[in-house]
Image (spheres, rainbow, N blue to C red):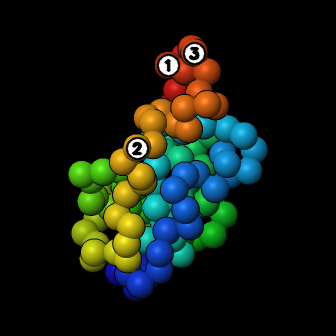
């Protein structure tokens, strides 16, 4: 895949847009092109999918511990990909959903 850059580090430990807006996420996805970290499709805001649509960076990798799968939003299929630059996942001590101080008590009702 030509749009994957294995040398690019992730943008941070959480969803960029959720952090800027004070939101929260269920799981995180990392752009395989630029390292942008966004929230998954089950999260209220679906920022990883939005990033793919806005930038044309269609391939994301899970940013969850123990997961190394890639997803291509342009084909809606799993794809193979290389090992990306560290870190490989969000911080292990980060709550799921997270961040803990921004997750509403009724969070399950907000999932997609």
Does residue 73 appear anywhere in the picture? no
For the N terminus, which image quadrant?
A: bottom left
User: Which residue is painted at 25% across and 69% down in the image?
Assistant: 80
Please state if 77 lies on the left or on the right of 30 as rendered. Answer: left
Q: Residues within 10 Å of mark 3 (few under 14, many from 20)?
A: few
Category of crowding for the residue at label 2, using alpha-carbon neighbours closer than 10 angstroms: few (below 14), some (14–19), many (at least 20):
few
Q: Position of residue 74 (x, y in %)?
A: 46, 62
Q: Which mark is drawn over residue 93?
A: 2
Quadrant of res 95: top left
How packed is label 1: few (under 14 Cα within 10 Å), some, or many (20 or more)?
some
Say the numbered circle drawn on residue 108.
Answer: 1
Is residue 75 positioned above or below 8 on the image? Answer: above
Q: Of callouts 2 and 1, which one flags the residue occurring earlier in the amino acid sequence?
A: 2
Q: Is mark 2 on a helix, strand or loop?
A: loop
Is 106 above or below relative to 32?
above
Identity of the residue drawn at 42% across and 53% down: 90
Question: Looking at the image, which residue sits at the far front?
Answer: 93
Q: Where is residue 58 in the image (x, y as percent from the top left)?
A: 49, 66
**Which mark is drawn over residue 105?**
3
Give the mark toward the camera: 2 or 3: 2
Q: Quote the CA–CA distance across marks 3 and 1.
A: 8 Å
Answer yes or no: do the residues labelled 3 and 1 have beta carbons within 8 Å? no
Provide the secondary structure element on which disc 1 rests: helix
Determine the residue positioned at 51% across, 56% down: 13
Q: In the image, is residue 44 above or below residue 104?
A: below
């Amino acid at each position: 895949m030509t749009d994957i850059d294995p040398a690019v580090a992730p943008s941070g430990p959480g969803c960029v847009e959720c952090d800027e807006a004070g939101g929260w996420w269920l799981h995180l996805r990392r752009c395989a092109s630029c390292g942008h970290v966004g929230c998954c499709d089950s999260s209220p805001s679906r920022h990883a999918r939005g990033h793919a649509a806005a930038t044309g960076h269609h391939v994301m990798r899970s940013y969850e511990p123990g997961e190394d799968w890639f997803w291509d939003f342009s084909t809606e299929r799993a794809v193979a990909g290389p090992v990306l630059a560290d870190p490989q996942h969000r911080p292990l001590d980060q709550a799921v959903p997270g961040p803990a101080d921004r997750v509403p008590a009724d969070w399950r009702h907000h999932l997609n």
